Amino acid sequence: MAMKVVALAGNPNVGKTTIFNALTGMRQHVGNWPGVTVEKKEGVFEHRGQRFLVVDLPGTYSLTAHSIDELVARNFLLNGNPDVVVNVVDATSLLRNLYLTMEIFEMGLKNVVIALNKIDLAERKGIKIDVERMARVLGVPVVPLSAKEGKGLEVLKDRIWEVANGLIRENPIVPRYDPEVEREIEHISRVLEGTKLAAKYPLRWLAIKLLQRDAEVMKLVERYLGREGLEEVMTHINEVEERYGKAMDLVIAGQKYEFIDRLTHEFMSYGRPSGDAFTDQLDRLLIHPVYGFIAMALVFYGVFKFVFAFGLPLQEWLSDAFTLLGNWLAPHIANDVLRGLIVDGIIGGVGMVLSFFPLVFLLFLALSFLEDLGYMARVAVLMEGILRKFGLPGKAIIPLILGLGCNVPAVMSARTLDNEKDRLVTMFVNPFIPCSARLSVISFMAALFFGGKSALIAASIYVLAFAVALASAWLVSRFVPGETTPFVIELPEYLIPSGRSLLLHSWERSKEFVQKAGTVILLGAVIIWYLSNYPVPVGTGGSYAERIGHFFEPYMRLMGLDWRAAVSLLFGIIAKENVISTLGVIYGSPEAIRNAMAPLQGYVLTAVTTLYIPCIATIGAIKSEANWKWAAFTTAYMVAVASVVGILIWHLGVAMGLG
Amino acid sequence: MMGKLELVLEQIKREKRTPLEIAEKLGTTVEEVEGIIEILKSLGYVEEIRRGSSTCETCPLKKICGGKCFVSRNSGGVRILKFRVKD
């Protein structure tokens, strides 16, 4: 007996694959659809002595042929001659799912079985579906099932067998449009009547697709009617669209949706009012323009509090461990130069940076927790409203959030924005967003100078950076012309994060910090050690580092800083962590830094480090994504802004008696 | 009279930013709005912009960070879908 072919069609994520696996078990074959890189899955099952070949079609929301997936699914339904089409629909989102069902019905197929999946979930959500009535209204068999639980699959097999063997006479309902659209469908159908196309495809379907300007169907019609014939039809459609004042694809899709909406009222009802889910209520609070910001401030203050409360004791322990290592190692190295290089340069510089690993790890852990929970998406929505007010495109929130990790991919991701203005402004402000490298500097300075208030201080630097970014965006967007396009952000469901996943992601992110310490920061520490010790040791006024630093010192004095800060900022251009290692090499220990600088100076240096210049890699990314002029302008602007901010903070602080 | 599909499209154009906001404005459910957005997407009126892997693939720092920055976290990350209204 010949094998019958069963096509599985449905929206993405409706449980189609679960049903496919449940039907076919291990008897599956995976390949590609001819000519395209879309996965084709086939499998075999046997029921009542009949063998069936199941073809899993790509998941689609419609059959409009805007994507390869839709085209593959549509072509198979039209030309693959399946004996049965199993349309898997999600009972919890019936309106959306039945849109595809109607498109299948419009193809004139009379061998469809509806697999009404997730019926248990729908019941739990208070959605009541009268399955028998649904089958009568739709004119095809409907099988309620829960594929995940394995319920209803035997009945589905029965229905497939019955349809395949012609035991069920179907009368699928097809959407009806307003009289004018129906008149046009009839008109185009008459034009196509009598052509060879009429023998191959349902005329009504062809007419609807032509009205929707379906590119594939237009090609098909041109092949059979010739260019002139197609142009005649399209001229007519143009006139119809002019009368409607909008594209016919939207008119037809809209009316089809309304048809489905009316239809579902006949067999579906909601047991409880919609929209009162806990997550919706929570979202209303978290993206509220006032309460949302209060919640965000509390959440991020909590994050910094957590990071410093648990991270600082570990940081101090690591710092002591590096000091002990240096003290232990020093007597074992006879050569003075080598001892200085290893103990003061490498352990003093790199060790000081590495001691901040616990804080970096804990911050990534906290951010990963917020991300996996779904909270960062709410922050994105909240911030998006602010961004727009300051002339940034709302979509810039993605590059800005990426900037918290690393500014280089963040600058590159600006290419997804719609126009030149959006891209330029987003790239321009991105380097102000403190990346993870600057996080270590912020943590270091906050912990070193502000003890119990370090969480508040670190948070204030982030607020300052975002404020400067927004103000800069507002300023520069005045001079860069262009318009932005509207968009929607879809919020993910809240999820309780898994501990393993959190630890894994946090480690993956913070691993970079350790890798960098062993490469760029190590190299920087060695160079700064050399510059600090040659030709004469630091402190004598004649070392290379002092000479370089003294050149900038008059300028640094305006911010209350000295030549040491100038040298550390210079090395920070290569990698921001070098600011810490440079201070470590020059001063010798964290205590020496604390003794030499006032907390206000520490705060100024932190703010300036956060704002003063993008790292070399970020400058390169801006140059390659825009041009060297934009990269140079961004760099110069940042230096200027950081100087102004540094000078202001210093003088305001002194005036307030904090200096 | 505009149908729900067009109403949702209109709300997107009027800068309603989330399905929840649109649902509240139209007096329907978030699920229905999300469903309509999917249909509009399949019609080509709304376009999804994902944080794809292309940014990561072409990033000059990929060798250093191994693609472990925020970009690579498609699952479990910020998980926001962006849509763009076509002409």
Image: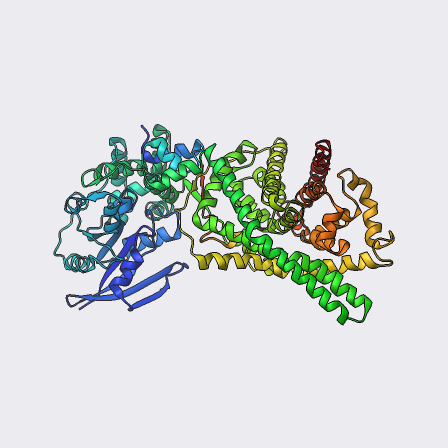
Choose between A620 and A624: the one closer to the eye: A620
- The answer to whether one can see residue A518 in this image is no
Q: Is residue A378 above or below residue A567?
A: above
What is the tally of numbered marks visible in this picture? 0
Choose between A399 and A125: the one closer to the eye: A125
Choose between A10 and A187: the one closer to the eye: A10
**A257 displayed left or right of A472:** left
**B19 displayed left or right of A659:** left
Residue B44 x/y as whole percent: 40, 42
Q: For the point 51% across and 53% down, which residue is it?
A: A365
Residue A465 x/y as whole percent: 62, 40
Residue A342 x/y as whole percent: 74, 65
Residue A576 x/y as whole percent: 67, 51
**A297 displayed left or right of A527:** left
- The answer to whether one can see residue B30 in this image is yes
Looking at the picture, the colour scheme in use is rainbow
Q: Quadrant of the C terminus of chain A?
A: top right
Choose between A204 and A649: the one closer to the eye: A649
Q: For the point 37% across and 32% down, which residue is it?
A: A246
Q: Quadrant of the N terminus of chain A?
A: bottom left
Seen as rendered, the residue at the extreme left is A167
Q: Is residue A209 above or below residue A501?
A: above
**A438 displayed left or right of A337:** left
**Quarter-wise, where is residue A487 in the image?**
top left
